[in-house]
Amino acid sequence: MPTFRTRHSGVLVLVLSLLVITALLAPPPVRGTAAPQQSQNELLEQLQKAIEKVQDGDLEEGLAEIQKVIEAEPRLAAAHFYAGQASAQMRRWQQAYDYFVAATEQLPGYGIAHVQACRMAYNLRDFDGAYQHAMRAAQAGIDMTDAFAGLEAVTNLPEDWQQRLEAPRVLIGNIDTEALVAQGSSTFGGRQAEQGNAGADQRGVPVVDPFAGMGGGDNPGAFPLGLGTSGAGLAAALQAEIHEVRRRFGEELVRSEAFGVVSDQELANLVLYIKVDDIGEDVPRPLTGFVKLFDLSSEEEVYSRPLELRNISSVSDLRNDIARYVGYMEEWLREQRR
């Protein structure tokens, strides 16, 4: 089995002095509604205790506790990751692989989860899967030289694998919901000042917290902002659906052979910026706005396209629409290289 060298990026340095969003459509519970069953902190504490059980050798009990966290909040990538770690220690390769893949699905650019998924796929002799995760780990900034060498010894790698390593790396920025908050509707409470701005700074660079919903460089996979609470009514539903739009863009960019996805600004070439102008309040629920790419070296907008998603409440419609928009980005990139 190939070995792996992991490069740690350290503490995030905001080289462009970008501002930080303090919230992502995280409205407080509406008066008169039930309180959340478990807060974010409670679930994180529950996960930490479960991890400690795994570290103490109580693998079955620790895994069972982690699974409870996943049931309470399926979007918590770190829970999937540590469930995979526990499963791997019990040599349950397929179960571990499934957990690591789930972690990468919840947090696009989760490099170390791709590393572990690569290892599990290799143990299962799924060399194509091992290659795909090795590539995504490498695109996320992890040195996978030994992994590729090991895979070359047992299978034929695609002819373009070296070119894929050089694909532009994209940082998934926050979604700009300022226009929604500024509407002052009952859905969002008109809390523009409290929600924070997600527009652009004076240079036109998107205001973005690269690690919003990622937990930071040393703690990837923590809660997306505002998740882990039940919220209330339409506001809670929209909060989850907007998060899903962001996640789906990351997922489709990870699948793309033209781009890589990173969670460290120091490794990024481009920032993906999504602006939401309006969301329908009925189902089907359309979303309109813009999708943009900013070049981090020049601090300039290099790509922009109006965004029209037919129904963000439908998994299949959302996946198909976002795949189409990533296809537009791939076409733009090919034109830039001509």
Image (tube, rainbow, N blue to C red):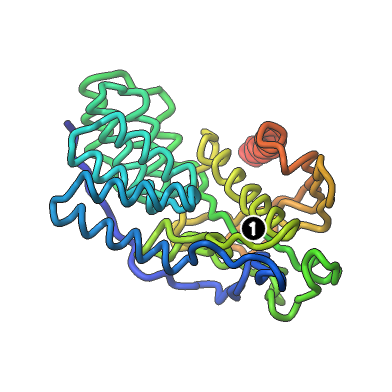
Percent across and percent down for residue 329 are 67, 40
Residue picked out by circle 1: 294
Name the residue at 32% across, 30% down: 130
Q: Secondary structure at mark 1?
A: strand
Q: In the rendered image, which quarter is residue 91 located in?
A: top left
Q: Dot 1: few (<14), some (14–19), or many (≥20) neighbours within 10 Å?
A: many
Name the residue nearer the viewer: 264 or 239. Answer: 239
Name the residue at 43% across, 40% down: 102
Name the residue at 22% across, 39% down: 88
Q: Quarter holding the N terminus? A: top left
Name the residue nearer the viewer: 287 or 39. Answer: 39
Residue 297 is at least partly visible in this image: no
Q: Against 263, is 308 above or below?
A: above
Q: Against 78, is 338 above or below?
A: above
Q: Quarter holding the C terminus? A: top right
Left or right relative to 239: residue 154: left
Q: Amino acid at mark 1?
A: Phe
Percent across and percent down for residue 27 are 68, 69
Name the residue at 69% across, 61% down: 232
Q: In the rendered image, which quarter is residue 207 located in?
A: bottom right
Residue 60 is at least partly visible in this image: yes
